[in-house]
Amino acid sequence: MAKFKISLNMEFCRSADKSFEAGVKIASELGYRWVEPMVHTGWELLSEVNYFHSFSMEEDPLLMKEICDRYGMKVSSLSAHSPLMKPEAAVDRLTRAAVLASFVGCDFLNSDEMIKPDWMDDAFAHDTMRYTLTRAAQVCARHKKYLCIEPHGVYTKTTDGLLKIVNLVDSPWIQINWDTGNSYLAGIEDPYEGLTKVRDRVFHIHAKDISMAHSTEERGKVTGTPVGCACGEGVVDWERVAKIMEPVDREIFLSVECGKIDEAERSISYLNKALAKWLV
C-alpha cells in the first residue's frame, strides 16, 4: 500500500521575495519536515541578494544540507526543471542535480520537457529529448537517483505523451512526477483516469490544487501552471488521489506546490487530516 510523506516545494515563498534559507526556516515553522528546493546553474542575481529561493549548484554541495540541518529539515527532492529539447542547458543541470542529490540525501529530481522550439518537428524533438535523457540517466544510475518527468508541456499534457517521453530511454531511473494541477488544467483527459493509467511509474507527486476561479480562467487553455492554491481549497479530490495510488507499494512524497506562505500553512493542516491514514 502506498504511503505518503508531505513536503513543500520552495515556490511557496517566491511571491514573498524570500531567500532559500529564509524559506527553509519558514517551512520548518509551519510544521513541514521536508522541502523541495529549486536548483539552477550559474549565479542568479535575485538569489544572490536573497530575494529569491532558488539554490545555485555552483555553491558547495554540502551548503544546502547544512542550511536544512540548521532548521531540522530534510530535502525530499530537487526541482531541477530543465528544457529537455535544449541539451546544452538540460544535460548540465540534470547531471549536476543528480550529484547534488547524493550530497543532500534525496532520491528524486523533477523536470518536464519545457518549451519546444518552433524550428523542431516532433521527431526531431523526441530525438533530442532521447539524447538529453540518455546523458541524464547515465549519471542518475551511478548515483541511484530517479529523474521524474511531470505533465506540464505540449507533449506531456496527455498520459500517452508523458509515457512516450519517459520510455524514450530504457532506464529504471526515469519515472514520473504526477502533477495533480497541471493534469487537470490541460483539460484533455480525466486527471484521475490519467493517474490510474500511469500510477505504476509515479515515484513522486506535486500536490498542486487549482481554485475554481483558476479553473474557469485557464482550464483547456494551458498545459500547466507554476503554482496552485492551498490544498483542499480547490478542485482536486485528494482522497481519490490517495486511493488510486494505494496499490503501489512504496513511499511517495506529496510536494505541496502553492504560491503563498499562508497557503502552505493551510495545505499541511488540510493534508495531515484528509490523508491521515495514508501518511507515513
Image (cartoon, grey):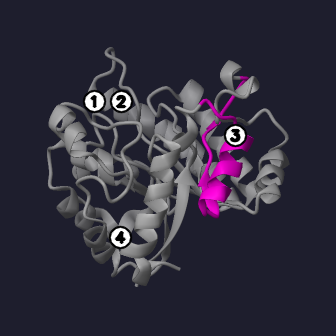
Asked whether residue 41 is drawn in magenta, I would say: yes
Tag 2 or tag 3, which sits nearer the N-term?
3
Kindly identify which residue carries mark 3: 20
- Three-letter amino acid code at the position of disc 2: Ala
Q: Quadrant of residue 238?
A: bottom left
User: Does label 1 or label 4 sit earlier along the sequence?
Assistant: 1
Q: Which residues are magenta?
A: 17-43
Mark 1, residue position: 122
Which residue corresponds to the image point at 50% horizontal and 63% vertical from the top-left?
172
Name the image quarter holding the N terminus: bottom left
Residue 220 located left or right of residue 60: left
Q: CB of mark 2 within 8 Å of CB of mark 1? A: yes
- Give 34 or 93, whichever is nearer the viewer: 34
Mark closest to the chain's N terminus, 4 or 3: 3
Name the residue beneath numbered marker 4. 200
Specify the amino acid type for callout 4: Asp
